[in-house]
Image: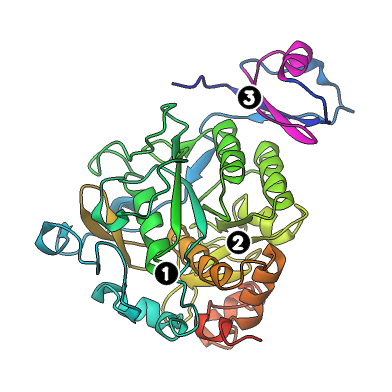
């Protein structure tokens, strides 16, 4: 199992920088090194000798990032009829996982209204590739790799578990004891409901309780970029800005990888990081912060607002759950993969589109929600509006 560290030190890493040089200078252990970009060093003591003029940044590392809490019964998924079993104990999805049978839109009945609200059925006539050729990295608690909903959908060659240090990012734990058990499985399932021919690259970087270290999440983002991700889904956040994660996001931007992050579920005008950084546009590249609305476009009572760019349904989203089950999930953790899936649809149709072009297209086609009287307290704080796939695929 990888070592854990009390602090993460982020430093510039010019070309020619080596791990040995950095460890000799700062001590500790280099956990991420990208020459020409940045490096992160794990430390178990605070480096008092850095000085006030140093470009190095040190921050607490352990359990500073959390899966954006699932909003439901005691913070866990809301079960359909107690514990919703897939038809015949297996998948209810056409051909194992797709909601599109031979090109026909066939959503799980539980999500019909959710997907109607974003025009997913109408998009089927334009987004005929259904995300084919696009890889979406899910940095989370892992995925139930044996779930029938994911048959043929996982990039098993690149999948990795950065918690246990192997290449099997399987969800671990129990829904009875672990607050975030099933979180990554649900997130991945939402993406595939929007873009069923996309590939999921699961990267386990969070513990079953949803917590994660800055060094591990940073490593996960860099890993995703280096192993073929086109889109990175971050249904996680921190109340504080993390320089190590910022370095990884800038690295993603420099490689044309678009990052989508959850705004958070505290009904606050203070969007969580890294979504706030993405909305601010301070990382030299495209990234999208996502808040949650209901199917009428009204801000979810739990969703953060302010530095957000787009809205998507995030209430009672039906998605796979470990051990072959399905559950209802709520939270910005689950509006975020709706946007990741939408980007996969758009990118598959136009592979040459840059992250900035994709982000601009989502914004230009979004449906305004400020005129809804229930959103009046949040006027000007709900980004471009609600995802509209029908309008997106009608753009010239």
- Residue 229 place in picture, x, y as percent: 56, 51
Q: Which image quarter is the C terminus in?
A: bottom right
Q: Which image quarter is the N terminus in?
A: top left
Asked if the residue under mark 2 is in contact with the one under mark 1, i.e. CB atoms within 8 Å, the reply is: no
Disc 1 to disc 2, C-alpha distance:
18 Å
Residue underneath mark 2? 289
- Residue 393 place in picture, x, y as percent: 56, 83
Which residue is at a point 82% across and 25% down the rendered structure image?
A: 16
Is residue 361 rendered to the left or right of residue 193? right
- The span shown in magenta is 19-43
Query: Looking at the image, is mark 1 or mark 2 nearer the viewer?
Result: 1
Is residue 203 rendered to the left or right of residue 263? left
Quarter assignment of residue 8: top right
- Residue 252 place in picture, x, y as percent: 67, 48
SS type, badge 2 = strand
Res. 369 visible in picture: no
Which residue is at a point 75% across and 16% down the rendered structure image?
A: 26
Quick check: is 372 in the magenta stretch? Answer: no
Disc 3 to disc 1, C-alpha distance:
38 Å
Mark earlier in primary sequence (3, 1):
3
Look at the picture and state if 279 lies above or below 114: above
- As drawn, the label of residue 194 is 1
Quarter assignment of residue 190: bottom left
Quarter assignment of residue 62: top right
């Amino acid at each position: 199992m990888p070592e854990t560290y009390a602090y993460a030190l982020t430093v510039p890493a010019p070309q020619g920088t080596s791990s040995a040089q950095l460890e000799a200078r700062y001590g500790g252990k280099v956990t991420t090194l990208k020459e020409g970009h940045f490096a992160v060093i794990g430390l178990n003591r605070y480096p008092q000798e850095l000085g006030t003029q140093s470009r190095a940044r040190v921050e607490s590392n352990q359990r500073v990032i959390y899966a954006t809490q699932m909003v439901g019964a005691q913070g866990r998924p809301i079960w359909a009829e107690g514990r919703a079993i897939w038809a015949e104990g297996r998948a209810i999805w056409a051909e194992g996982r797709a909601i599109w049978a031979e090109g026909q839109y066939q959503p799980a009945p539980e999500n019909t209204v959710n997907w109607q609200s974003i025009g997913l059925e109408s998009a089927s006539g334009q987004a005929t590739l259904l995300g084919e050729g696009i890889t979406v990295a899910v940095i989370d608690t892992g995925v139930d790799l044996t779930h029938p909903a994911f048959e043929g959908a996982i990039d098993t060659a690149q999948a990795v578990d950065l918690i246990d240090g192997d290449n099997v990012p399987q969800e671990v734990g129990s829904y009875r004891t672990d607050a975030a058990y099933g979180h990554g499985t649900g997130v991945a399932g939402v993406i595939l409901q929007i873009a069923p021919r996309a590939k999921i690259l699961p990267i386990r970087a969070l513990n079953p309780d949803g917590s994660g270290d800055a060094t591990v999440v940073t490593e996960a983002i860099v890993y995703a970029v280096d192993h073929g991700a086109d889109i990175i889904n971050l249904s996680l956040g921190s109340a504080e800005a993390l320089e190590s994660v910022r370095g990884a996001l800038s690295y993603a931007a420099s490689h044309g990888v678009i990052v989508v992050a959850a705004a958070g579920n505290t009904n606050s005008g203070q969007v969580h990081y890294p979504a706030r950084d993405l909305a601010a546009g301070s990382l030299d590249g495209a990234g999208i912060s996502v808040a949650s609305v209901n199917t009428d476009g009204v801000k979810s009572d739990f969703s953060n607002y302010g530095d957000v760019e787009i809205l998507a349904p995030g209430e009672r989203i039906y998605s796979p759950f470990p051990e072959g089950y399905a559950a209802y999930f709520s939270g910005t953790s689950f509006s975020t993969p709706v946007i990741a899936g939408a980007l996969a649809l758009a990118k598959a149709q136009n592979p040459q589109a840059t992250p900035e072009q994709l982000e601009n297209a989502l914004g230009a086609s979004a449906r305004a929600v400020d005129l809804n009287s229930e959103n009046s307290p949040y006027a000007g704080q709900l980004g471009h509006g609600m995802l509209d796939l029908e309008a997106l695929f009608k753009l010239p």
